[in-house]
Image (cartoon, rainbow, N blue to C red):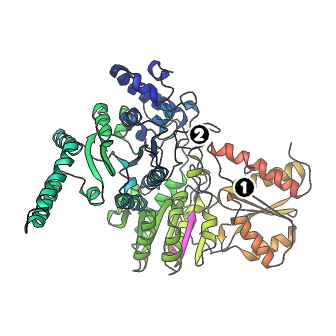
Amino acid sequence: MTRVLQKISGPDDLRKLSEKEILKLTKEIRNLLIETVASNGGHLAPNLGVVELTLALHMVFHSPEDKIVWDVGHQSYVHKLLTGRQEYFGTIRQYQGISGFPKRAESVHDVFDTGHSSTSISAALGLAKARDIQGRRNKVVAVIGDGSLTGGLALEGLNQAGHLGTDLVVVLNDNEMSIAHNVGAISAYLSKIRVDPTYFRVKKDIEFLLSKVPAIGGAMVKVAERVKDSLKYLLVSGMLFEELGFTYLGPIDGHNLSLLKTTLENTKKIKGPILVHVITKKGKGYRPAEENPDKFHGIGPFQIETGQPVENNDKPTYTQIFGKALVRLAKEQENILAITAAMPDGTGLKEFSRQFSSRFFDVGIAEQHAVTFAAGLATQGFKPVVAIYSSFLQRAYDQILHDVALQKLGVVLAIDRAGLVGEDGPTHHGLFDFAYLRHIPELVIMAPKDENELQFMLKTAVSYPGVVALRYPRGKGLGVDLVDKWDNLEIGKGEILREGSDLTILAIGSMVSPSLQAAEELAKESNIQASVVNCRFVKPLDRDLIIQLAERTGKILTVEEHVLANGFGSAVLELLQEEQVQVPIKRLGFPDQFIQHGSINMLLEQYGLNSTGIKTAALKLCHKRRVR
């Protein structure tokens, strides 16, 4: 551990440092961030960009008495370093290590669990009103990025905060715009005037005196207000926030620690909600991240010298296969459109956006809008493909049900990061999509066994007249050969990959490959012959095939990378009950709990969803001895 950072056991220690030590501390923090993320993977660029901002927040406010809520939370690494977690920082995002996001169970300084965007203002407002009701005087600060501000929830929070008028500081961390020296100087000057108590006192006195002038006093106050507003519109860039009831300060340089501290100190003099507009640079201090902030927003382990990934696996990812397949289909089918919610790179749509710019829409962090926007397009004969991560699509449940499925519209939901996502943990695992989609009428759910089948399923989805949910996992494919000719799959039909008479393994999506491996090992080691079915569809199920195999083999094992509650296995149980087929059945999936962060392989092993775990479950079902 470096020398100055060793002195910091909590935020109070920051106030004991000299300016020279603070400057050295910023460099030490950035070096540690780069070294740790290069080893563990994580969110590098956002954290490099908030070093000075985080220092200023903890030097001005007194956590944990004062409450700091981090939106999304992927920019909270510096906060963790300053709040007693240096000793464990090397474990960040590792199995049983500290989380890459704020976590209340981890520290009293983490006052709200986050991981999805646009929640901080609403949560902070709740904390502020609780403070008011309880008669306390602590400060509450929400730190939100400009991208998160596009989320509807953030705007709802701003609206309510302005209406209530309670004391609340919102720090808008804007890392998308540059700041010119003259704009910064003018804004700093205006901000200084507006936090001067004399300004507010004189303003109220003048308004009072004008209102007492007979006949014309009230009119004069209104004229003065119009003049004031016209000047504000001319000089102050935050009029939206002013109209919502906030006092707007900024924009200010988010890497000028002295200015940050002064501005944040000034917020303590103002009553009501305040928005501090801070300009930062993503990736600051590490050239590869500064030059390519999107790549280093969230990245796996990399070489510090070059910024290149450590992983040397040339297999394409499911996301890449999806993106290439959609481009090819869009060339053949002009009504195909692509929609994403601020994730063109993450969802593989970058090339689509280049080749079909007029048919591509990035709606920002607004998943609900993305789905209903797609519904509107579908009513006019277009085939919109909405690519969103599984855990983020949860936000658009009502829109899927009410705006798409109820109207039987031809929208394709391309659900990326389905299943485990690994080190990002419970806020990002895509383990609930079968459950929140399966009960919706007029909706087809499919999941490919490999990257080649993903192409067939996408072709099937864009050809289908109704709504289709196509879910696929994060990361590399299996490395299978990709065929050029894509045929439509028959909706609701699975395929038998292996014949056996002792039991049937019904697998979906990413669990097909380990199920096949388990079946081969069962035959070799225990002379148990298992049929293995790539079910392909969670809805509709291949009823005839499942009933036939259940009656023939007498035992069913279902395997899914999803929670057991209302998942694929539950659908099979319902089918067998409806058909009054009574056979022993075992469901493999995730239990009724939130799955913590860790490597995907480690988590699959822990919950019995690798080939060994599947083999063990099959042996138990067949009343054989356990795997050694």
Q: Is residue 601 magenta?
A: no
State which quadrant residue 229 falls in.
bottom left
Question: How far across and how far down the image is residue 540, in percent?
Answer: 66, 74
Name the residue: 53% across, 77% down: 405
Q: Is residue 461 above or below residue 276?
A: below
Name the residue: 56% across, 68% down: 469
Label total for image: 2
Mark 2 highlights which residue?
106
For the residue labelled by badge 2, is the local secondary structure a helix, a strand or a loop? loop
Question: How far across and how far down the image is residue 500, in percent?
Answer: 84, 63
Mark 1 highlights which residue?
591
Q: Is residue 239 above or below residue 286?
A: below
User: Which is nearer the eye, 304 or 261?
Assistant: 261
Q: Relative to residue 512, is residue 380 drawn left or right?
A: left
The amino acid beneath tag 2 is Glu
The amino acid beneath tag 1 is Pro
Task: Please tell me whether mark 2 or mark 1 is closer to you in this view.
Answer: 2
Q: Is residue 411 in view from this perspective?
A: yes
State which quadrant residue 164 falls in.
bottom left
User: Which is nearer the eye, 219 or 422?
Assistant: 219
Q: Is residue 254 in view from this perspective?
A: no
Question: How far across and how far down the image is residue 188, in percent?
Answer: 21, 40
Magenta segment, which residues? 463-474
